[in-house]
Amino acid sequence: MKRTLAIGDIHGCLAALEHLWRAVDPQPQDRIIFLGDYVDRGPDSKGVIEFILNLPPDLDVTCLIGNHEEKFLLANINKGELAHWLDDWGGGDTLASYGASGFKDVPATHWEFLRKALPYVETDSHIFVHANLEADVPLALQQSFTLLHKKFGKPKPHQSGKTMVCGHTALKAPHLPINLGHAVCIDTDPGRGGWLTCLDTESGKYWQVTNDGEGRAGAI
Ligand SMILES: [Mn+2]
């Protein structure tokens, strides 16, 4: 049976992503949607992007952009953004994962990955986005701030009637997904000792792993 697999914020936690892949075992008939925030905080941001770029080509993979990818791109072209990224966003961990020369060591394939990541994706029943939506604004007219930065809070149902699936707002212990019916958040904070979450929006089943390989599952 086809699954639609949304994967929450990874934040450099390559080991967690590898554990999650073994637990979920995505197949060519599944649709896989990464919700963004691949980089910063965790130990191997480069490895996370490399893992995604090296997935088998017969898998149906969509990658969304998160605010941390936007910051990575901005830091490369603006000194103020670079200082902010390094001081406050964990960007130093990301650059260190590429090696001693920083931006010079980031391969062209990774810049292309960052630039090609999509702001949202829509199915018949769901809208997938990194951060949030304005309830009364059509999807195509949403502001970048809302899509990439706006915290989850208590979102109203989107005017489309579709269920929003997002990450971005880190859910603290016990690190479980939040399901409001019309909106679901699956950022369970793996970069700061939490869990990495994958949700099948068809069945409601979710899988969670830690960077240490601990695993659990449940349903929303
Ligand atoms: Mn985010």
Image: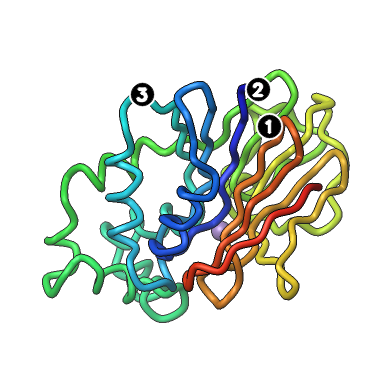
Q: Which structural element holds mark 2?
A: loop
Residue at 59 percent across and 63 percent down: it is 215
Mark 1 crowd level (few <14, some 14–19, many ≥20, 10 Å Cα):
many
Contact? badges 1 and 2 (CB < 8 Å): yes
Circle 3: element type: loop
Q: Amino acid at mark 1?
A: Ile
Residue 168, quarter of the rendered image: bottom right
- The residue labelled by disc 2 is 123
Compare marks 1 and 3 and give the one earlier in the sequence: 3
Specify the quadrant of the image occupied by residue 82: bottom left
Query: Mark 1 and mark 3: span between their CA atoms?
Result: 23 Å
Say how many tags the image has: 3
Residue at the spot 57% in from the left edge and 60% down from the top edge? 196
Q: In the picture shown, does residue 179 fall above or below 101?
A: above
Give residue 190's quadrant in the image.
Answer: bottom right
Secondary element at image label 1:
strand
Mark 2, Cα crowd under 10 Å, few <14 / some 14-19 / many 20+, is few
Q: Amino acid at mark 3?
A: Asp
Which mark is in front, 2 or 3? 3
Q: Earlier in the sequence, mark 2 or mark 3?
A: 3
Q: Camera-side residue: 46 or 148?
A: 46
Q: Amino acid at mark 2?
A: Thr
Determine the quadrant in which ligand 1 lies. bottom right
